[in-house]
């Protein structure tokens, strides 16, 4: 698959397993899920869901930039929450990272996420 470009940036956390931060094929980029890790320390950010969502979106934005775009190029965003009570807070944070018209999106509650965080966010970009 020589048409695949692997996207990596030190401005987002290093992968925690056998995956890439993003893969770009043509004008589409698939961004792996980002959790609220500080990319320099790889530590989970302190604070509640708003702080965690801001960090996860910041990490995702850094990967989008490394892929040649921004979160405004997102056509689909998937959000996983460990508590659906955090839905409104995450929506408020997303509004600060994405402009209208907003991308398609799914938001689901999950039993758990890596490192015990409350949110994970992934995206597909059309560049």
Image (tube, helix red, strand yellow):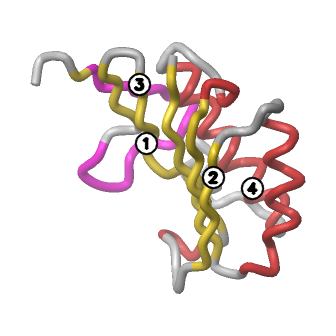
Q: How many marks?
A: 4
Q: Which residue is mark 2?
A: 105
Q: Earlier in the sequence, mark 1 or mark 3?
A: 1
2 to the left or right of 47 = left
What is the secondary structure assignment of the residue under circle 3?
Answer: strand
18 to the left or right of 37 = left
Report the front residue among 26 and 31. Answer: 26
Q: Which residue is mark 4?
A: 53
Question: Residue shown at 89%/53% (left/top)?
Answer: 92
Report the front residue among 91 and 41. Answer: 91
Question: How far apart are labels 1 and 4 at the CA level?
Answer: 18 Å
Question: Residue shown at 66%/30% (left/top)?
Answer: 71
Q: Nearer the viewer, mark 1 or mark 3?
A: 3
Q: Which residue is mark 1?
A: 14
Report the front residue among 117 and 23. Answer: 23
What is the secondary structure assignment of the residue under circle 2?
Answer: strand
Asked if the residue at tag 4 contacts the one at tag 3, i.e. Cβ–Cβ closer than 8 Å, the answer is no
83 to the left or right of 35 = right
Q: Nearer the viewer, mark 3 or mark 4?
A: 3
Q: Which residues are magenta?
A: 5-19
């Amino acid at each position: 698959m020589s048409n695949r470009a692997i996207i990596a940036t030190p401005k987002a956390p290093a992968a925690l397993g056998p995956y890439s931060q993003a893969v770009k094929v043509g004008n589409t980029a698939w961004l792996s899920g980002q959790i609220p890790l500080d990319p320099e320390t790889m530590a989970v950010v302190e604070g509640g869901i708003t702080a965690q969502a801001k960090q996860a979106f910041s990490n995702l934005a850094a990967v989008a930039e490394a892929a040649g775009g921004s979160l405004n190029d997102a056509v689909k965003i998937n959000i996983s929450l460990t508590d659906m009570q955090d839905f409104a807070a995450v929506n408020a944070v997303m509004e600060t990272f994405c402009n209208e018209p907003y991308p398609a999106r799914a938001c689901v509650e999950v039993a758990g996420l890596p490192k015990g965080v409350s949110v994970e966010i992934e995206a597909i970009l059309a560049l």
